[in-house]
Amino acid sequence: MKLYHCKNSRSLRPLWTLEEMQLDYELVTMNFPPRFEHDGYLDVNPLGTVPSFVDGGVTLTESTAICHYLAEKYGPTPLAVASDEIGYGEYLNWLYRSDATLTFPQTLVLRYTRLEPEERRVPQVVEDYTKWYLSRLRSVESALEDREYLCADRFTIADIAVGYALFMGISLGLNEYYKPNCQRYLKSLMEREGFIKAMACK
């Protein structure tokens, strides 16, 4: 298995999953954006996005899908929630929500505060999508009111997927607006050995 990774990017999700599952893998760490900074990367992933994950003849490029793939293919693992378990529906919903609802607005904030040249930055986009992200985060705050993790009464890849979105908010300065449950949750996730090991990977 080989994971193409950029520090603090969405590839942290599958990297964290690999560390939690204690699987053997090869890590290729690249500068961002890899389509310009890593020669030959477009041959691996014509989209030029990160991550890319190669397992034999299988190539995946969606961070949460890679987590799901690892948990299903290389389980059994408590990181996955089975279809006959209570919480399975919640589990799937959080997996999909993590990127479509939570990470998406953050990417626009990132683009229009840091990635675009000064003359192309759009403060109104940043303001609008900051509000979008924080309003969607209410669902996480509410879900954590009486529990430690999002579903199935245990740590799963749903927590990795959503936890990454919360972690990404730190680099954008959005975490100062997090409510108590999200603050507590993010702190506990960042204290996990799997997260610490993933962050230490070079």
Image (cartoon, grey):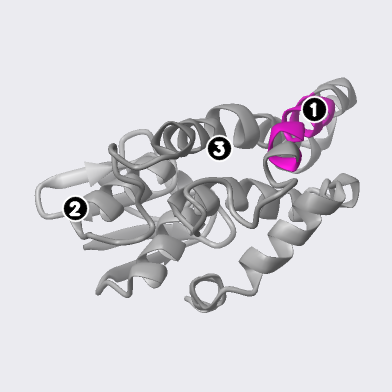
Res. 98 mark: 3
- Nearer the N terminus, badge 3 or badge 1? 3
Q: Is residue 17 above or below residue 173?
A: below
Q: Which residue is mark 1?
A: 135
Query: Main SS of the magenta segment?
Result: helix
Q: Give the left or right position of residue 93, taking residue 120 as reference.
A: left
> Disc 1 to disc 2, how far (Cα)?
35 Å
Q: Which residue is mark 2?
A: 73
Q: Give the left or right position of residue 194, taking residue 65 as reference.
A: right
Q: Which residues are magenta?
A: 129-141
Q: Give the left or right position of residue 41, taking residue 169 as reference.
A: left
Residue 19, given in percent of the width and then of the height, sits at: 40, 71
Q: How busy is the neighbourhood of tag 3: few (under 14 within 10 Å), some, or many (20 plus)? A: many
> Disc 3 to disc 1, how far (Cα)?
14 Å
Residue 76, given in percent of the width and then of the height, sits at: 23, 60
Q: In the structure shown, which secondary structural element does the residue marked by tag 3 occupy?
A: helix
Mark 3 residue type: Ser
Residue 81, given in percent of the width and then of the height, sits at: 36, 47
Mark 1 residue type: Ser
Residue 45, given in percent of the width and then of the height, sits at: 30, 41
